[in-house]
Each structure stands twice: as C-alpha cells, then as structure tokens.
Image: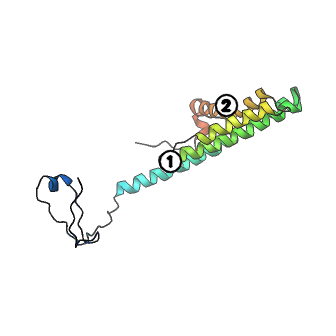
C-alpha cells in the first residue's frame, strides 16, 4: 500500500506520520506541532562528577599498566636475547629478537584495541592475527630465520603478562603506587 498524498503538498509541508496503522484503518491522526522544543542540558550531579573522576583514574591506571607491561616485555626480551647470544648463537638470538619485537608491536595493538573496546562496534583483532601469521610466513620462507626462536620471541609478551600477574598477586607491596578503589 502506497501512502496517499495530495497534489498540492510538498515534502517540506507534510507532517511525519508515526503510526501507519492509524491512516490505514481510517483512524484519526493527530497533527504534530511545528514549534521548536527547547532542550536544556542536564545539570551535572555529584555522581556524574564522581563517575568521571573514576573513569579518568581508571584510564591513568590502564596507561600505567601498559607502560609496565612494555618495560617488563623489553627487559625479558633483552635478558633472553643476551642469554641466547652467549649460550647458542648470534643467529638464534637475532631470530628471538625479531619475534620479541613483533610481539611487542602485537601487545601495543592489543592495548589499543582494549582501549577502543567500549567506544566502537568494529570487530577487533583482525590486524593482530595478520601480524602473527605474517611473522610465521616470513620465518618459514626466509632461509636465515628459524621458526622456533621467532615464535618463542613473539610469545615473550605473554611471559611479561604472567610475570606482572604473579608480581601483583604475590607481592602487592611492590605495586603500592596503585590505590584500591572503594566501591
């Protein structure tokens, strides 16, 4: 069923119909007023300010967590790379270092996706998995790269997360800069 329009009406002078069923059943439709409606901004309540301060505090905590994870990842990567250079060979150490650097980039991409998580509805993680797959493809195709040291280097960020969790669980005094949130 097509809506019926009078010949003298233009789209600018027609009023919107909110319920199609009223017109189709022969019921009465009420005209909509063309006067502007004033909308005032809601008053800021103390609860809104508290939520905003808590949100800002959690953002600061999150950025501090990111920095700590990057530092722990780079320290572990440096120690393991140096150890591999001493006990194995320079090639194995460089393969591990390549994987660790790509793993750090992966960690940064993951942190960016987590920060965007509640703000957008886009799918997350497609670029990250492509980064890992690309690293493994390059490691299998380039003759100088070895798969296992590169893979273990990539997984260093997971070791850093595990170390951070163990430190905050068993030695909370070392992390005294974070204040617990009372809820």
Res. 65 in view: no
The residue pinned by badge 2 equals 159
Residue 68: x %, y % from top left = 64, 42
From what the image shows, is residue 176 above or below residue 92?
Answer: below
Quarter of the figure with residue 70: top right
**Among numbered discs 2 and 1, the one appearing first in the sequence:** 1
Crowd rating for badge 1 (residues with CA inside 10 Å; few <14, some 14–19, many 20+): few
Residue 103 in the image, given as x and y percentages of width and height: 69, 38
Q: Which mark is residue 38?
A: none
The residue shown at (74%, 33%) is 137
**Callout 2 crowding tier (Cα within 10 Å): few <14, some 14–19, many ≥20:** some
110 lies left or right of 96: left
SS assignment at label 1: helix
Vertical comparison of 86 with 128: above or below: above
**Residue 59 in sight:** yes
The answer to which image quadrant residue 88 occupies is top right
Closer to the camera in the image, 181 or 29 = 29
Q: What residue is rendered at 59% in x and 47% in y?
A: 112
Q: Nearer the viewer, residue 139 or 111?
A: 139
Q: In the picture provided, is 11 more to the left or to the right than 138?
A: left
Look at the numbered disc 2 and give the secondary structure of its residue: helix
Q: Residue at x 78, y 30 (%)?
A: 140
Residue tagged 1? 58
Q: In the image shown, does 62 or 96 lie closer to the viewer? A: 96
């Amino acid at each position: 069923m097509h809506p019926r329009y009078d010949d003298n009406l233009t789209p600018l002078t027609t009023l919107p119909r909110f319920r199609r069923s009223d017109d189709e059943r022969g019921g009465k439709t009420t005209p909509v007023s063309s006067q502007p409606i004033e909308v005032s901004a809601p008053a800021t309540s103390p609860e809104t300010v508290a939520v905003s301060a808590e949100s800002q505090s959690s953002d600061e905590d999150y950025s501090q967590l990111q920095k700590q994870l990057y530092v722990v990842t780079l320290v572990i990567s440096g120690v393991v790379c140096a150890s591999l250079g001493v006990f194995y060979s320079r090639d194995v150490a460089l393969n591990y270092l390549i994987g660790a650097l790509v793993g750090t980039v992966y960690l940064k991409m993951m942190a960016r996706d987590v920060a965007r998580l509640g703000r957008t509805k886009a799918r997350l993680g497609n670029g990250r998995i492509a980064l890992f797959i690309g690293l493994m493809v390059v490691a299998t195709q380039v003759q100088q790269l070895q798969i296992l040291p590169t893979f273990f280097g990539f997984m260093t960020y997971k070791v850093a997360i595990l170390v951070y969790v163990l430190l905050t669980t068993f030695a909370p005094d070392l992390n005294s800069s974070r204040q617990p949130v009372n809820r």
